[in-house]
Image: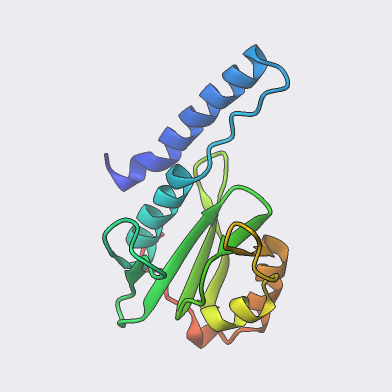
Amino acid sequence: MSIKKIPETIRQLYEIVDELEASFPGRKFTPDGHMVGSIGEVLASYYYGIILSPASTSVHDGVSLNGTKVQIKATQGKNIGIRSCPDYLLVLYIKRDGSFEEVYNGPGEIVWNQASKMQNNGQRAISTSKLKNIMKEAHSDSRISRIAF
């Protein structure tokens, strides 16, 4: 599958989600977990030139073109969870139409220091709205440049 087909594939996925939810009122069929994470990693690889590490690599999901270790998070919700302090963090919000929005692109330590206390699941949560505010404060020269549009 070509990277260019991902938006259409995601739109089709949500058509199926809508059909399932209409057929089973009260049940949610939101795509999440590994699937959304993997979609985010593939998008980050293509659009930011990140060289991905093997799946389930601890802390960092890949390396940027300048050699920076990067943790990639993708969400369709209002929060993300992080288990440890990454060198660098890229957070993408995957939209129902298959496009994405950059929520955070900057040093991981800033986010780690502002995330919640460690929860029972071993993660520290932070909202996407807070991430957007943190990114406004981060220097634009510390961001990973997008290489494809």
Q: Give the image location of residue 54, x and y in percent.
A: 26, 59
| Figure coloring | rainbow
Residue closer to the observer: 54 or 76: 54
> x, y (%) of residue 140?
55, 83
Residue 98 in the figure: left or right of residue 113: left
Is residue 56 placed above or below 96 in the rendered structure? below
Q: Is residue 116 above or below residue 77?
A: below
Q: Residue at x 59, y 61 (%)?
A: 81
Identify which residue, 101 or 61, lies in the foreground.
Answer: 61
- At 44% across and 68% down in the image, what residue appears? 71
How many marks can you see?
Answer: 0
Identify the residue shown where x is 35% and y is 39%: 5
Q: Residue furthest front?
A: 120
x 30%, y 82%: residue: 67
Looking at the image, is 99 positioned above or below residue 90?
A: above
* Left-right relation of 93 to 57: right
> Which quarter shows the C terminus?
bottom left
Q: Nearer the viewer, residue 28 or 68?
A: 28
Give the image location of residue 106, x and y in percent: 53, 78
Residue 107 in the image, given as x and y percentages of width and height: 52, 81
The N terminus: image quadrant? top left
46 sits left or right of 83 in the view: left
